[in-house]
Image (cartoon, rainbow, N blue to C red):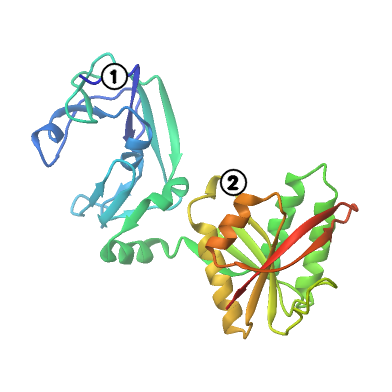
Amino acid sequence: MKEKPKVVYHGSQYLFDVLKPRQANGQCEAEAQMGIYAAATMEEVIPFAMPFRFYPDCPEGKLSFDSDGIKSYLRYGSVNPNGKGYVYVLPSDSFELIDEWEWLSRTPVKPLQVIEVSVKDYWHTISFSEEAKRIQQELYGEPYVCKIASSSEVNEKWDILVKEHPDDSNWAVWKKDIITEISEGKQIPYYGIFCGEIICEAYAVPNYTPGEDDAGLTEDGTAYLSAFRTVKRYRGKGYFSKLLYFMLEDLRQKGFARAVLGVEPCEELNRQMYFHWGFTEKMYTGTCTYPDGTVIEVEYYGKRL
C-alpha cells in the first residue's frame, strides 16, 4: 500500500475558500467519481490549474485536453498566455488512494495554502493540436516572438539590466556603448518576447575581425555573437534556442558565412551548450577587458552558417 503523504495537491483554474466534492467525467470508474481529486506532488496537478477555456467561451462551446501528469495537450479550446490558475495544498486526512497516483476525498476540504501559478511559467509544457493552434492564433496571436529589437525595446531592456546591477558600474557603460553601436549599425539586437515581456536577448556584431592572435582567421562575412541572456524563470524551457536559430538564419539570409562566440574557460556548462548548437570549431583564445579594467580570458568557437 502506498504511504499517504501529509499533504496532497489539487489544481484548478478557479479560486475557492473551501473545496467541495464534484462529479468527475473521467474515462474509467476511478476517474469518474464524486469527490475532490488530488496528487502527491504539485507538478502532477499543474495541467489542471491551467485556465483552459471552452471555444466559443460559452455553454455551447467545446473543450478537450489530455495530460500525462506533467504536460498538457490541448485538442480543442484555448488558454490565455497571460492567465493564471491555482494549486491547493490540502491536508490528506480525508483522502484515499484510488489508483496509482490519484487521491480522492468525498468530503469538503479547507486548503492549508493556495499557490497562484502563471501560464507563462508553464507555457513550455503545453502543446496544441492544429485546430487548437488556429484558435489560439485567432484569439491571442503568437505569444512568443523572435525579432530584431527596436530602439525603444533595447532602451527598455537595458534600463532593466542597469537597475538589476546597482553595484556594478560596467552595466551603465555597456548600455551607452551598445545603444550607440546599434544606432551606427555596428551591432544587431535580437530579442525573444513573450506576451510583451522581453525574456531573451543576444547581439550580433557584423563583419567581425578577431584580434591579433587570430591565427589568420580574418575573413569577411563573420558575425560575432554575444550577451546571451534569458530571464531566470524562463531558462531551460527552449526559448533561447528558438531565438538563436532565428538569429543564425537571419544572419545567413544577410550573407554571413560564419558565426563566432566566446566562452570563458571556466564556463564548462556554457561550452557544452554551445557545442550542442554546433559551435565546435575552436578558433583562438584571447582576452576581453571590461570598462572597469577587469580582464578575462575567452575561448572563441565558430560555426559555419
The residue at which mark 2 appears reads as 232
| Quarter placement of the C terminus | bottom right
The residue at which mark 1 appears reads as 109
Q: Nearer the viewer, residue 224 or 299?
A: 299
The residue lying at 41 percent from left, 61 percent from top is 140
Q: Which residue in the rendered view is the most extreme toward the front? A: 215
Q: Mark 2 or mark 1, which is nearer to you?
A: 2
Residue 252 is drawn in which quadrant?
A: bottom right
Q: Which residue in the rendered view is the most extreme toward the right? A: 293
- Inspect the image, locate mark 1, and give the three-letter code of the amino acid beneath it: Val
SS for dot 2: helix
Judged left or right of residue 206, residue 251 is left
Q: List x then y, in percent, for residue 52.
A: 31, 48
Q: Is residue 297 visible?
A: yes
Q: Which residue in the rendered view is the most extreme toward the left? A: 29
- Inspect the image, locate mark 2, and give the three-letter code of the amino acid beneath it: Lys
